[in-house]
Image: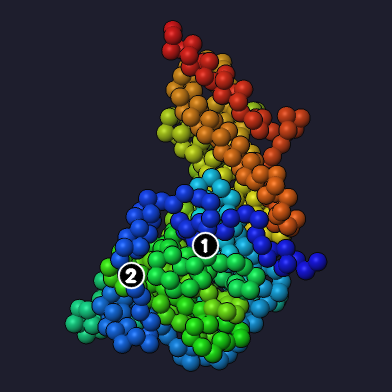
Amino acid sequence: MNPRMKRKIPRIPLVTSEGEVAGQLALPIRKQKLLSAVKETQVKFLSPVDTDYKALVAENYDNFVVQPGTELSSELHTRLQQGFETLLTNGYLYQHRIRFRNKTVMTPVSRTLIGEPGMTYRYLNLRLFALPWTFDDKKKLSDVEKACNAFYELNTYFKDHVNKLITEKFASSTGRKIDETDDSLKTIIQRNTEFKATILNYMDPSEIRLKQEPYYNMGDIAVSWHKDESLVDGSTVAVYNHVPMEARQDCSKWKVGLKVAWDITTPAVCTPLNNKDCYYMLDTMNDTHQHCVIAGTLPRYSSTHRVVESSDSTLCYIQQRCQTALDNIGYKDQIPYLKSLETDVLQLIEEIHSEIEFEWLRQFWMQGTQHSQERQYWLKPMEQLQEDWKTMELMTKLMIDIVVKKKDQSHMIAKILLPSLVERNELRNEWMNRYSEKEFYHIPEEHRPIYEPCWTDANSEMPLPFDLSQHIDIIQECMDTNDSQ
Ligand SMILES: O=C(O)CCC(=O)C(=O)O
Ligand SMILES: [Fe+2]
């Protein structure tokens, strides 16, 4: 059976984007209000064929810029188009199963993240781990690596082009002549152009049943109204559009929709895109507006470059956090002990411990075998993170021992441990029960979750059991006796 056929009718609800789930789920109140207002008022949108379109864009969407593909070199287009195709044919683009209001839902669009080595991007409660787009000079690149590198080239182009757009905008809004040494200009440019990763999107509309755009009747919605998450405030999003077989009429083309966030009095805009076109949401546009993608009739790819808010989303960051925690373990005659028992130190270690387990290890392995095989770059670092995490299990065990033996600081340590262990146990349960049996059964084998780390009580290497319930009871008891003394 053709593996693509299996995906034709998704068994689990589709999420079309942030905050927008097709079917079953209750709507947020804000959206309900908007929808009932829509019924009463005639809300409208304009397209480039409408006479007032230009004026509307100038007034309310001046940070939205469409650039015809002719401005990019044909060599770059060729590399990008080959890049998309290579990634699709090698199975790198697939629909994401994400958790949304306690349900598992599937994105209609197939995706992957490419970016700076060690970059991750969190959206819809899923952490994406980037395929690197740059490599050591001497490395002989595989086709997939060459494909990723093409998007780095596009990224370099986008940095340069957005620099120009922002500089012009700055000059026209301040009425000043362009001065490249101007510090405020430099800051704005940096904020807008430090693209760190791109999400590639792919969809063949003939394979997926889509919902209608709910407010304006724009057509079939592939990516529903949203703002992009986890970005630096006031940063640009730059998008490349690729439709291998171009539709002739506007009505069959893919379109990008824009509206002022939670506003139905200002008309929205809906702009058809041609193959190779780029569009930009400059500066604060992603903060003040929402965008959506309306499906055309033919398959389409896009590459969406983002200035990721990366303070807590790089491999370097989590490795440093690990080191901070591990600095507190010492060994005397090979016997481990905690160097400091200060509240803040222990609290921080417990936080890091859970962060590694739930934000990194489980997020990575939950995405399945194919996902991990594709990410050779990540395998060694993940192994090391898991080793470090295991040492943190030992550190937690040392804390528990102090509580149980009623040593000096036991009450204070119990107060830190109790909420931390309760939360860890709950999160473990949640991760282990992420899919119902029925859902699990319908996940293709290569995308099935790997429940890692996972161990049984028979595993003598692990300092603590997987299920923390008994330890939680013991600590609770210690606290109760301590309180009653
Ligand atoms: O494909 C596009 O044009 C934009 C997709 C999008 O909004 C997203 O991936 O966040
Ligand atoms: Fe988006």
| The furthest residue to the right | 1
Q: Judge whether 413 appears above or below 317 on screen.
A: above
Q: Earlier in the sequence, mark 1 or mark 2?
A: 1
Residue 358 lies, in percent from the top left, at 56, 44
Could you tell me how far apart the alpha carbons at marks 1 and 2 are, in whole angstroms? 22 Å
Residue 391 figure quarter: top right
Secondary structure of the residue carrying numbered label 1: strand
Q: What kind of residue is marked 2?
A: Val
For the residue with label 2, is its CB less than 8 Å from the closest atom of ligand 1? Answer: no
List the residue tagged with mark 2.
43
- Direction from residue 28 to residue 222 in the image, left or right: right
| Numbered mark located on residue 16 in the image | 1
Residue depicted at 60% across the width and 26% down the height: 469
| The furthest residue to the top | 485
Secondary structure of the residue carrying numbered label 2: loop
Residue 323 visible at all = no
| The furthest residue to the left | 175
Residue 182 lies, in percent from the top left, at 25, 76
Give the camera-side residue of 316 and 230.
Answer: 230
Cβ–Cβ under 8 Å for marks 1 and 2:
no
Residue depicted at 61% across the width and 86% down the height: 245
| The furthest residue to the front | 40
Is label 1 or label 2 in front?
A: 2
Q: Judge whether 424 appears above or below 55 on screen.
A: above
For the residue with label 1, is its CB less than 8 Å from the closest atom of ligand 1? Answer: no
Residue 331 lies, in percent from the top left, at 61, 32
Residue depicted at 43% across the width and 29% down the height: 342
Residue 43 figure quarter: bottom left
Assign the C terminus to one quadrant of the image.
top left
Q: How many marks?
A: 2
